[in-house]
Image (spheres, coloured by chain):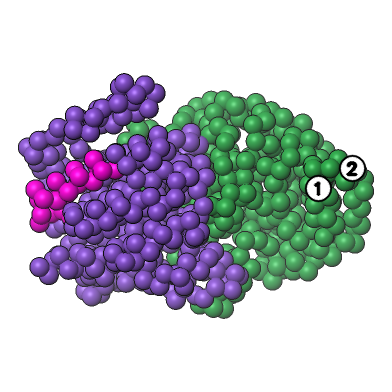
Chain colours: A green, B purple
Amino acid sequence: MIIDCHGHYTTAPKSLETFRQRQIDGLKDARLAPAKDSLIIGDDEIRDSIEGAQLRIQRERGTDLTIFSPRAGGMGHHIGNAVTSALWSGICNELIHRVCTLFPKNFVGVCQLPQSPGVPPANCIAELERCVNEYGFIGCNLNPDPSGGYWTDPPLTDRYWYPLYEKLVELDVPAMVHVSASCNPAFHFTGAHYINGDTTAFMQFISADLFKDFPTLRFVIPHGGGAVPYHWGRYRGLAQDMGKPPLKDFLLNNVYFDTCVYHQAGIDLLTKVIPADNILFASEIVGAVRGIDPETGHYYDDTKRYIDKVDWLSAADREKIFSGNVRKVYPRFAARAAQ
Amino acid sequence: MIIDCHGHYTTAPKSLETFRQRQIDGLKDARLAPAKDSLIIGDDEIRDSIEGAQLRIQRERGTDLTIFSPRAGGMGHHIGNAVTSALWSGICNELIHRVCTLFPKNFVGVCQLPQSPGVPPANCIAELERCVNEYGFIGCNLNPDPSGGYWTDPPLTDRYWYPLYEKLVELDVPAMVHVSASCNPAFHFTGAHYINGDTTAFMQFISADLFKDFPTLRFVIPHGGGAVPYHWGRYRGLAQDMGKPPLKDFLLNNVYFDTCVYHQAGIDLLTKVIPADNILFASEIVGAVRGIDPETGHYYDDTKRYIDKVDWLSAADREKIFSGNVRKVYPRFAARAAQ
């Protein structure tokens, strides 16, 4: 079985975007704010939006199931306030639930959280519980920078985040560390902000002792871990200079990397320096890069091809990367599959 | 000849740091502000600070010369205002000049610029000219984020920076894109802010057409280019989706990467995906990571060892990486060497 742990609903019906625009307009003029039930999306619209995109790509590339969440760039936690984010997250998560219900063999849900800059993460607990307990979601996306590129909230290791972590541990669900759109003109969103978010989070984990307080808390760092595997020597050395244990013992029981790295040399490096126990297959479809690589003739984001070509992975390693690690990191997936 | 293009004066005499602290104290209480000439550092102090550190390491590792600049983390452009930065940059650059004068065979200078958040970069021109024309410096370090981690200035491709670029082109000197310390608790400075700065700058270059306006402007992106080579497929794909030419044609006449990547797998990837014409040897001594890698028994930042082990580099490629590219990117070095 091949599980893609990182897919977003980037192909949602247009009316979702229209609703969001009306919600944003309503922040300036309350008379323009849409009622929640004014957004009507039929099952057929959902089927259409998925069948020709994610479902077709799953078939073409030979993957079986995608861990599916709302469009990351669309979370927009910097827009409006906690009320804005609560309504918007509720709507986006419900749509993911509908996709997973319509295609139960192909998708399993992960929620976005109703974060807002400066608002304590404890505020996200109710939506997390709703998504896990009522929708059967198996994880969440956690934005380390709800400000959208100004990084005004405390590091992920600050006690500020602890109430949410307590709930993640209690529910036994992991968080993928995933920023949203950047409203800072310095940062291109998928080319800089996403990758920086990944790198930043990992270095925050090195700089503190979060997993002493939460030994079973688990994070997936997407986009191949940002810059981390490429600079694995730097991170091992920095941890050593700080008097921390070797990274393998210090962080790799709690931190995992996905395979959203869009060329062979990158996947080669990832699978050389990061243990197979900590790598989860992912391609981020339909996502950041949509073209065909003229050097290979295949889609940049067809990451399964790169992994298939790595000849030093044993069959057991491959099984871990393609599905075994998902069962470990997302135990609710395993429980669901066992039913 | 082996030239290290990226070394900082991290071992400067303690009195420099004391002066800086007094300068910072003077921002709160002007009576505490030190006079410039209160900082007295003797030649012997400078010799001592270099001989047991950078010079010893050059000898031990077999490098000949270091392109040397003030401590990057110490630039602190977010501290005080333009007057603060002018005084501090002048002092730091003068010290580099004294190192280069005392050890002319071992060091050649690169200046820090007196940047401040929100202050037009044109304000740095006088100091740049002074360092190049009077001190014989061959380049500068340019901070893409003088705010120290809040990224409040425009992207490097904005016309805001153009007057400085005009001067760089006129003087025919390159800029290394190098952030300073982070005052944002989200970003560890050498582990997140440095690497993010590199990644961010490269994506800014992809998103605009800066080198149409400045075809001979040259940037060195340090720390192996941040996350860029590891995600080379992502960057090629993003450029392609944006309708830009292939990165090789679009940016690689103007953008270069150093080799400050502290493990073999990282250097392997760098030399696989980035043409040898665009790689400059560097180790950032005495710098970010100071320990010995228990996996190899050698210093993490002894990057020459990694390059020596890459067996697909031809003799011509090695010559480019170790010195030829420096002559190309820093023409004032070549002119100086010819004298």
Dot 2 and dot 1 residues touching (CB under 8 Å): no
Residue extending furthest left?
B44
Q: Where in the figure is residue A90, as x and y percent of width and height?
A: 81, 41
- Residue B118 vs B169, above or below: the answer is above
Q: Is residue A16 magenta?
A: no
Magenta segment, prevailing SS (helix, strand or loop)? helix
Quick check: A298 left or right of B11? right
In the rendered picture of this protein, how many numbered marks are placed on residues?
2
Residue A88 occupies which quadrant of the picture? top right
- The numbered mark 2 sits on a residue in which chain? A
Q: Nearer the viewer, residue A99 or B328?
A: B328
Span colored in magenta: B88-108
Q: Where in the figure is residue A329, as x and y percent of width and height?
A: 61, 43
Which image quadrant: the C terminus of chain A?
top right
* Circle 2 Cα neighbour tier, 10 Å, few/some/many (<14 / 14–19 / ≥20): few
If you read the primary sequence from the N terminus, does the residue marked by circle 2 or circle 1 appear first? 1
Residue B138: mark: none
Q: Is residue B98 magenta?
A: yes
Q: Residue at x 79, y 62 (%)?
A: A50
Q: Residue at x 40, y 72 (%)?
A: B215
Q: Where in the figure is residue B278, as x and y percent of width and height?
A: 34, 68
- Residue B222 vs B72, above or below: the answer is below
SS at circle 2: helix
SS at circle 1: helix
Give the residue pinned by disc 2: A31
Q: Where in the figure is residue A253, as x and y percent of width and height?
A: 51, 38
- The numbered mark 1 sits on a residue in which chain? A
Q: Are marks 2 and 1 on the same chain?
A: yes
Q: Amino acid at mark 1?
A: Asp
Q: Residue at x 44, y 35 (%)?
A: B183
Give the residue pinned by disc 1: A25
Q: Amino acid at mark 2?
A: Arg
